[in-house]
Image: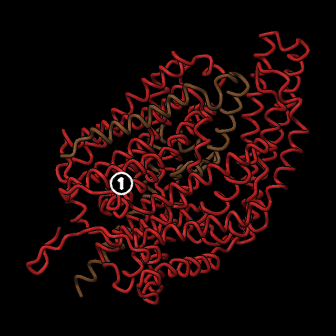
Chain colours: A brown, B red
Amino acid sequence: MRARLRAWGVLLFVLALCWGFAQGGGPWLQKRIPMVDRIFTVIEEQDINANAYFYTEIEESYQAERYIQGSLDLGVPGEAGLTLPLAVGILACVGLLWLGYRYLPMD
Amino acid sequence: MVEKNGEIVKDVGKWEWSELWKKEDWWAIWLGFAILIAGMLIYFPHAGKMKSKLEAAEAKYADKAYRTDKFKTVAWYQLQDAKKKVTAKSIPAGKWLKKFTSKPHKWSSNPINAFMLSKEAAEAKKAKAMAKYEKAKAAEKEALAAAIVAEEAAEAAGFSDVALNAKAKNAITKWRDAHLATSKAKKKTKVRPYNQIGYLIGLGVAFALFFAIGTKGMGKSVPKFLLGFIFVFGVAVLSYVAANQATMKHYGIGYAAWAIFFGMLISNTVGTPKWAMPAVQTEYYIKTGLVLLGAKILFEKIVVIGTAGIFVAWVVTPTVWLVTYWFGQKIVKMPSKRLNATICSDMSVCGVSAAIATAAACKAKKEELTLAVGLSLVFTSIMMIVMPAVIKATFPVDKQLILGGAWMGGTIDATGAVAAAGAFLGEKALYVAATIKMIQNVLIGVIAFFVALYFTTKVEVAETGEKVGPMEIWYRFPKFVLGFIVASIVFSLFYTYFNSQIDGLGYSMIDKGTIKGMSDLFRGWFFCLSFVSIGLATNFRELKEHFVGGKPLILYVTGQSFNLCLTLLVAYIMFYVVFPELTATI
């Protein structure tokens, strides 16, 4: 019974610590470190999902794709799209992985 | 080979057709495909309508948009904005799906707001946001007028006056900044009252029944699974609530971290309830999520960044992966090859998503995935803050945006953190960083296939000490990887097919249709369920065993340091030595 109560106590204590960080510790730290404050202000103002793990989870990826594609199409059409150096880059990637497959240490 | 009751039992792989409905890997494929096919049935019939809308946008802006190649005109941006609004997911079914699968909302001090917002509170928020929006709108109108005047002046000179062109470009950039601020402010005015509780209960029931189909097929007890699922889903909801708290969002502590944390906290204090264990199915959820992830690996995306970016994203990354793996085996002497491979992927490719795919492909233990993800999350938060500061302080001003953006995009693990760090430097840095990260994301498919092949045909062979034939390789190969690859190839082909009809249709139908309007809505939940399961089944002591001597940390830090140096060097060479004219256009 005592061990059970202790376990619940630890659980609630850790949750309280998390709450404390969310409501007090985190914002306090943000105000004390100017760089952190500036980055977080940008995140808030631009509504960036800093938690995202994959490119489809943020709108900025799609904006970036259109921007970069448009820039290259307009400015250097010869170097946009499927070019020879691009194909070389892809082949280099495959070649590197093949080398790894052949020669990575097994011990 | 294993010894059983004094007899040697040879573990020989044997293919049986019943695997198709009895094995977890195949159920992951069937369930993942079911969602993707449903998405195609919902959205693809609307392709004609989307195409017409895109044609209308082109008819309105295209002629004016491409008047010059000296700079991007106002009409060019207006064309992009008009095309961006054409999305298949905006059909009524798409809107309903979004509402039904919605995660708990963002909140700051009152956790109830994660689930519900009253009409009065919504109105108050809206009124506050409207004031900012009106101000931003007026500023944008003014900036647009100035941009049009400057562009007309440049046009009057036949776009051949360098000074007038530069002035127009500058004015257009200012208008775009104002436009960005307005659209962000507008988004905040769309506050509506909500009550998510009913939807979350419905979603939990739908997921329970969805996964129960496979559970039944695999011959496990469905009632026990359904009962346990209530608990696992509840912890998943709690993880999203914590991740969507304002401070946690700023620090980039996402649902994966919270799901593992809450799961481990429960299992190591009060203990995971026994009745919940039948639903603690890490592999089942993760593999289904990975098949859905495959649909997002669109190969056409890699041609976007062009020649310079591909070397940063697709040559540096495998180099770092291989060198770090070698370092882990030969120098650090990692006790587990699987942990080594998982850390290499999350550090060099793209954090959590790559770690999940690699761990599943090489059959890593749940503790190994937890460690790799934990390391990635900690270093992502640090790098998101430190890297832009270092770039600002040390890079020449003219190289901060593109070189800095490419450096951060190639090295910071998680996409959200890349965007935040990029946005801090400026819009151009954000775009370069996000594009490099997007192309790296596509590499997950290649790396997962490589890892699955390497571990099946080399590592497992070395471990068993026996040569294996093609059938044995097929038997051992993680089948869900096939589902992942098939989904990627099929959706890449659809993406290219739609884009061949009219530019932007792939974006409307795939990116903003089947992916954002279907697979993405479910994938996040499935990964969250798998991380909750990892936590609920992980013991602190077991986790500690994998951290002996701090080897995983040494491996991550060394690999990331090498990644930082090589990415910076290659980005500089590619963007400023080999292709400077390409860089000048960005």
**Is label 1 in a helix, a strand or a loop?**
helix
Q: Quadrant of residue B284?
A: bottom left
Badge 1: chain ID = B
Crowding around mark 1 (Cα neighbors within 10 Å: few <14, some 14 to 19, many 20+) is some
Q: Residue at x 45, y 76 (%)?
A: B232
Q: Quadrant of residue A9?
A: bottom left
Q: Is residue B457 above or below residue B3?
A: above
Left or right: B251, with B324 as reference point: right
Left or right: B455, with A107 as reference point: right
What amino acid type is highlighted by mark number 1?
Gly
Q: Residue at x 73, y 66 (%)?
A: B42
Instruction: Classify the position of the N terminus of chain B by image quarter.
Output: bottom left
Instruction: Classify the position of the C terminus of chain B by image quarter.
Output: top right
Q: Quadrant of residue B171?
A: top right
Q: Which residue is mark 1?
A: B374
Pick the front one: A91 or B363: A91
Q: Residue at x 42, y 46 (%)?
A: B447
Q: Residue at x 45, y 64 (%)?
A: B287
Residue ranking furthest to the bottom: B223
Q: Is residue B111 above or below residue B374?
A: below
- Residue B477 appears in the rendering: yes
Q: Position of residue B127 (x, y in %)?
A: 78, 57
How many numbered circles are shown? 1
Left or right: A46, with B86 as reference point: left
